[in-house]
Image: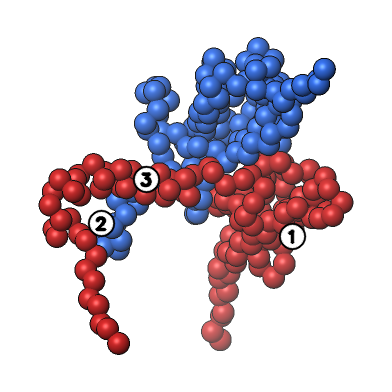
Amino acid sequence: MRYIRYNTPTRRSLPAAAFGRGVCNGLESEIDRLFNAAASGSQSPHSGSRFPVDVYQDKNNLYVRAELPGFGRDDINVEVVDGNLTLEATRKSDSEKAPLAAKFNRSVTLPDDVKTDGVTAAYVDGVLPVTLPKLEEVKPRKVSVAVG
Amino acid sequence: MNLIHSLIPSLNRNLVVNEGHHDKDLGPTVQPNYEIKETDEAFNLSVNLPGVTKQDLAITAEAESLRIVGKRSWNRPKDWTVSHRETSDAIYLLELEHDNRVKTDNINAKLSDGVLRLSLPKAEAIKPRRIEIS
């Protein structure tokens, strides 16, 4: 058995002319391009199962805003179960072979001071804002006990 | 983490916000998700623009490129505090080059539920042509 030791040519082992700076620059920009493509909008609008969700609050309400472009109102399901707000959206495709094209699902754990009833949601321009009213602040009850 | 950043210089930069566009007034922009489907007659482009209304959308078609700028019309009320953010406030900007392959005077655009659907009719020169055999 022959043992061949092979050194991968590097910039140091080769003369500068053979492995010039231009090659590296080209590769670098190509890698940049690949990473940028992966990070931005090259994926199709109908792929993926996550969608961005924002959570805001003020004194009276907790607001959850989800970006869910391109759904019908009937395809969006908002539920509050066990202190979690679940947003679910399904998209049916045109072809009969695969009627369910996409299913999106997110769930947000709600803080304790949020009421589970009186939750309202709308769907405007592809954004789903959900308003969850907070419990009125429970004032500590002062009980005076007469010591007899 | 520093090692990863030194290996992949692109990660060190801000990936989402792109300020390399021509229009400096626009501020930070983000490229929206889009999809192009090609038929014999046209290119059908759909762009996800959640939170953009008709009034805040500008589509400019030039001889060789198409430019879509969409501003989010919703602003956070002042007394709302942020608990968690995943979206950005950056303006949507999509610039596509089509090299005269599209009839720019015949573009059809429709915006519904945060999705912009554009039908870009193909220029005659690139349409498939049936050649009769004499």
In the figure, residue B2 lies in which quadrant? Answer: bottom left
Q: Position of residue B103 (x, y in %)?
A: 65, 16
Q: Position of residue A103 (x, y in %)?
A: 72, 57
Amino acid type of the residue that numbered disc 1 sits on in the rendered structure: Glu
Between residues A2 and B54, which one lies in front from this camera angle? A2
Of helix, strand and loop, which one carries label 3? helix
Q: Where is residue B64 in the image (x, y as percent from the top left)?
A: 52, 19
Residue under pointer 1: A79
Of all residues, the one furthest to the front in this rendering is B134
In the figure, residue B55 lies in which quadrant? Answer: top right
| C-alpha gap between disc 3 and disc 1 | 45 Å
Chain shown red: that is A
- Assess whether mark 1 and mark 3 are in contact (beta carbons under 8 angstroms): no
Residue under pointer 3: A30
Query: How many marks overall?
Result: 3
| C-alpha gap between disc 2 and disc 1 | 45 Å
Looking at the image, residue B92 lies above or below residue A13 = above
Of helix, strand and loop, which one carries label 2? helix
- Assess whether mark 1 and mark 2 are in contact (beta carbons under 8 angstroms): no
Looking at the image, residue B121 lies above or below residue A110 = above
Badge 1 crowding class, 10 Å Cα cut-off, few under 14, some 14 to 19, many 20 or more, is few
Residue under pointer 2: B6
Q: Residue at x 72, y 67 (%)?
A: A81
Between residues B21 and A81, which one lies in front from this camera angle? B21
In the image: residue A137, left or right of residue B78: right
Chain shown blue: that is B
Q: Earlier in the sequence, mark 3 or mark 1?
A: 3
Q: Which residue is drawn at 53% across and 22% down?
A: B99
Between residues B51 and B92, which one lies in front from this camera angle? B92
